[in-house]
Amino acid sequence: MTSLLGRRGVTLALAAGGAGLFSLGGVPLPFLFGPMAVCLVAAPAGVRLQGMGEFGVAMRTILGVAVGAAITPEVLARAPQMVGSLALVPAYVVAIGLVGVPFFRRLGFDGPTSWYAAMPGGLADMLVFGEQAGADMRALSLIHATRVAVIVTLAPLILTGFYGADITGAVGAPAADLPVQELALMAVAGLAGWKIAERIGLFGASILGPMILTAALSLGDLIHSRPPAEAILAAQLFIGLSVGVQYVGVTLRELRGFVLAGLAFVAVLAALAAVFTELVVLTGLALPVEGFLAFAPGGQAEMTVLALVAGADLGFVIIHHLTRMVVVILGAPVAARWFGAGPPAG
């Protein structure tokens, strides 16, 4: 226990130091990139980093609350306008599978590993499905961790350089400026929503549960603001940390094989994401920033953070990512049989 706490203490200290360093250096999103960069360097160097366990998961509930608070009657009134772009999400997932699975097969990975490495689902969900199908778990975890790390790194550069978005704005009001009763309601919605969603087996429980409960409070005119800036910055720190610790114990062979495969696949994903982003923007189904964030194949939590700091339409972005997750989680195990990636016999 002491050793575990010690490793977590070292990891948290490094993450906080990275956030401070990046803040002083004026780097965009310092509380996300600082911890991620420091942990990405420290993990392969042999530092014994450790994830934050349940506490780290709990910090993600803040993002669920932020999204839920953004779901207002005005957002619901615009829901029919999203139907056209949402209809493209299944086609997007199918396109990724048709390109990604043969891509990984050509690199020498087996069927189950190729299938679940290609799927643009959540890391935890794809690892669960992959393990049941007999995939190479180390390869799978490193490929998905690399996908998330690279997309989180490149997306802000694309937002600012290509779309002219400002990602230096405040992520929210300070806690001192928010009503105490709303802060209390958000805290309850975050923790209760997470645990209820976990109990009923909802995927992405730490984000979806709080989102649903907070949305109900928002629509009921009980919440009128999102979580305070301090909470959102803390959530960024723990997300950056969680990406970095995925590389603990990585070997040179794994770096050459699995991580490089993940990097190469990001280039494939970027091309497909660009096609679908242009499609929804040129057809008038989405504004450029929202279209880009909605089809960027990153993690739910990471894309929520970017949508927050870019001032994008949170409801639009998160609903598209939820649709992608539903399509992957419901469709991946069924379609896996067509690609010879089902569970091993017996």
Image: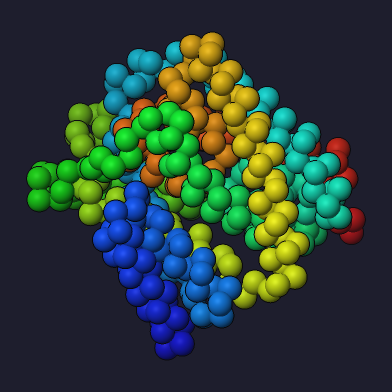
Q: Is residue 208 left or right of residue 150?
A: left
Q: Position of residue 47 (x, y in %)?
A: 51, 80
Q: Residue at x 86, y 55 (%)?
A: 108
Q: Is residue 129 visible?
A: no
- Of 193 and 101, nearer the camera is 101
Q: Residue at x 62, y 75 (%)?
A: 249
- Of 8 and 190, nearer the camera is 8
Q: Position of residue 4 (x, y in %)?
A: 46, 82
Q: Residue at x 15, y 48 (%)?
A: 174
- Of 268 and 74, nearer the camera is 268
- 150 w.r.t. 11: above or below: above
The colour scheme used to paint the residues is rainbow
Q: Residue furthest top?
A: 283
- 28 w.r.t. 310: above or below: below
* Quarter of the image that includes the N terminus: bottom left
Q: Is residue 15 left or right of residue 266?
A: left
* Quarter of the image that includes the C terminus: bottom right
The total of numbered circles placed on residues is 0
Q: Is residue 278 visible?
A: yes
Q: Is residue 23 left or right of residue 272?
A: left
**Residue 86 in which image quadrant:** top right
Q: Position of residue 331 (x, y in %)?
A: 70, 36
